[in-house]
Image: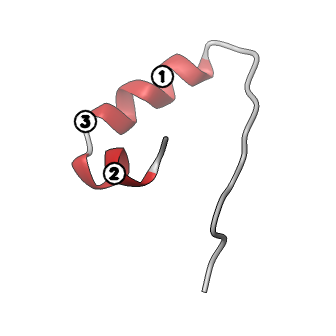
Amino acid sequence: AGAKHVYAIEASDMVDYARQLISGNPLLEQRIT
């Protein structure tokens, strides 16, 4: 169940904030590229 891949395009500074959140969570780091 669930998507194999999810694509997102973000033109604002939100992507930098998202990277900070992902880098602090090892489980997400393995799943998000």
Residue 23, x across and y down, in percent: 30, 32
- Is 18 rendered above or below residue 17? below
Instruction: Count neighbours of disc 3 (C-alpha within 10 A) and say few if under 14, some if 14 to 19, many if 20 or more.
Output: few
Residue bearing mark 1: 17
Q: On the rendered structure, is 9 left or right of 26?
A: right
Tag 2: amino acid: Gln
Q: Which mark is residue 2?
A: none
Give the secondary structure at mark 3. loop
Give the secondary structure at mark 1. helix
- Is 31 rendered above or below residue 2? above
Pick the residue in front: 17 or 31.
Answer: 31
Residue 24, x across and y down, in percent: 25, 35
Q: Residue at x 37, y 38 (%)?
A: 22
Tag 3: amino acid: Gly
Give the secondary structure at mark 2. helix
How far is mark 1 from mark 3, CA to CA? 11 Å
Furthest toward the top, the residue is 13
Residue bearing mark 2: 30
Nearer the N terminus, badge 1 or badge 3?
A: 1
Nearer the N terminus, badge 1 or badge 2?
A: 1
Residue 13, x across and y down, in percent: 62, 13
Q: Residue at x 23, y 47 (%)?
A: 26
Pick the residue in front: 3 or 18.
Answer: 3
